[in-house]
Image (cartoon, rainbow, N blue to C red):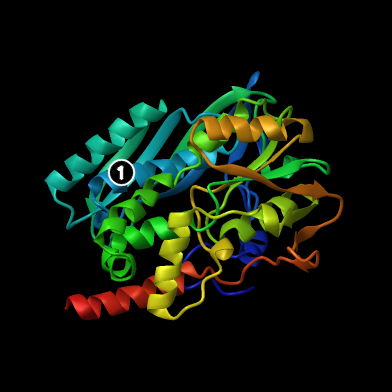
Amino acid sequence: MEPLPKIGKVDRRVFEEVILPHLGRRDPSVIVGPKFGVDFSVIEVGDRVLIVEVDPVFVVPEYGWERSAWFSLHILASDVAVSGVPPRYLFIDLNLPLKMSDEEFSTFWRLFHREAEKLGVAIAAGHTGKYGGVDYPMIGGAAMVGVAEREGYVTPEMAEPGDVVLMTKGPAVETAGILSTMFPEVIEKYYGRGFVERAQSIFWLQSVVEDALTLAELGPRKGVTAMHDATEYGVWGALNDLAEASGAAIRVYEDKLFMLEDVGKVVEAFSRFTGIEVDPYAAISEGTLIATVRRDYAGKAVELLEKKGIRASAIGEVLQGSGVTIVRSNGSEETIEQPRQDPFWPVFFKTLEEVRRVRG
């Protein structure tokens, strides 16, 4: 067996060799169980199904408490929303670090509650305590649950040949949102103080809840067939995950891809600052939704999203076969492999090292 990673999620081999064969009692009501590249499970309960996702509670005080509360909730909610089902119940375990003050916790929790109300999420049960050996950003875990009719959801396995591939917001949204929030002096160095606030507003794009639930208005399976958010490894990773899960090929067109102007400027600034070349399409991008829709619904899908102020484009199509290819502007085709490394991390840690040195 391959060793566990030093940090981050286990890889496919560990998942398939250690976790997948050992899942307790087999129960036929678990329609969709744990699968690599699928962010939620589906459990049949009578004539309804529960959409269940589990993730760490991810809190970064350096973002500020309002951003931290918003981001930690939307990470959880997004993984349910990509099923096409609104998140409804939250079960949460908070293992708080000893250094977190009563005032900090109260501020965080009130803001977390406020955002849950906005999303229509009831916090149904939980556990809260302070413990040694705990530190940010992972301060517990949570399960978010949605409720749907038996066939009122989609999974990344449901894309079919003939479907159109959509992308919202473009690549590197999370990369730009986090870097500009954590290191505003880098943005100011290249673009001036006036651009900093604009760049930091990218942070609030790091959710696919509205994107996914808007596409769900087309009808799960009838209009929208599959959705996946572009988290680690970005757009290229999400496309590969979706192609593999569906047992199909995906072809995208370079001329149809787009990147938000401010995201591009932020990525360029940090690439210059660190000397690390960044492929924005391989960079972490919570907030970017990759979806497939029936061809007859593609125009309506883009129209619905843009009415909500969400930039979107049809970037390709699902075909028979496997893997992901891109058709370049000159007509040549190139295979897009699953990225081996997300460029966000080396850029983040090199910037952190340099900024700490300068800040003293």
Q: Position of residue 23 (x, y in %)?
A: 62, 49
Of all residues, the one furthest to the top in this rendering is 47
Could you say which quadrant of the image residue 128 lies in? Answer: top left
Determine the residue positioned at 61% across, 72% down: 340
Query: Residue type at mark 1?
Result: Ala
Q: Position of residue 50 (x, y in %)?
A: 57, 29
Q: Quadrant of the N terminus?
A: bottom right
Could you say which quadrant of the image residue 330 lies in? Answer: bottom right
Determine the residue positioned at 59% across, 29% down: 304
Could you say which quadrant of the image residue 134 lies in? Answer: bottom left
Q: Which residue is mark 1?
A: 69
Q: Please say if 153 is above or below 194.
A: above
Determine the residue positioned at 72% across, 31% down: 297
The answer to whether residue 358 shows anywhere in this view is yes
The answer to whether residue 21 shows anywhere in this view is no
In the shown orientation, is residue 205 left or right of residue 317? left
In the shown orientation, is residue 80 left or right of residue 349? right
Q: Depth check: 253 or 289 in front?
A: 253
Q: Please say if 8 is above or below 105.
A: below
In the shown orientation, is residue 337 left or right of residue 274? right
Q: Position of residue 46 (x, y in %)?
A: 64, 19
- The local crowd at label 1, few if under 14, some if 14 to 19, many if 20 or more residues have their Cα within 10 Å, is many
Secondary structure beneath dot 1 equals helix
Q: Depth check: 117 or 202 in front?
A: 202
Q: Quadrant of the C terminus?
A: bottom left
Determine the residue positioned at 20% across, 45% down: 105
Of all residues, the one furthest to the right in this rendering is 320
Q: Depth check: 87 or 24 in front?
A: 87
How many marks do you count on the picture?
A: 1
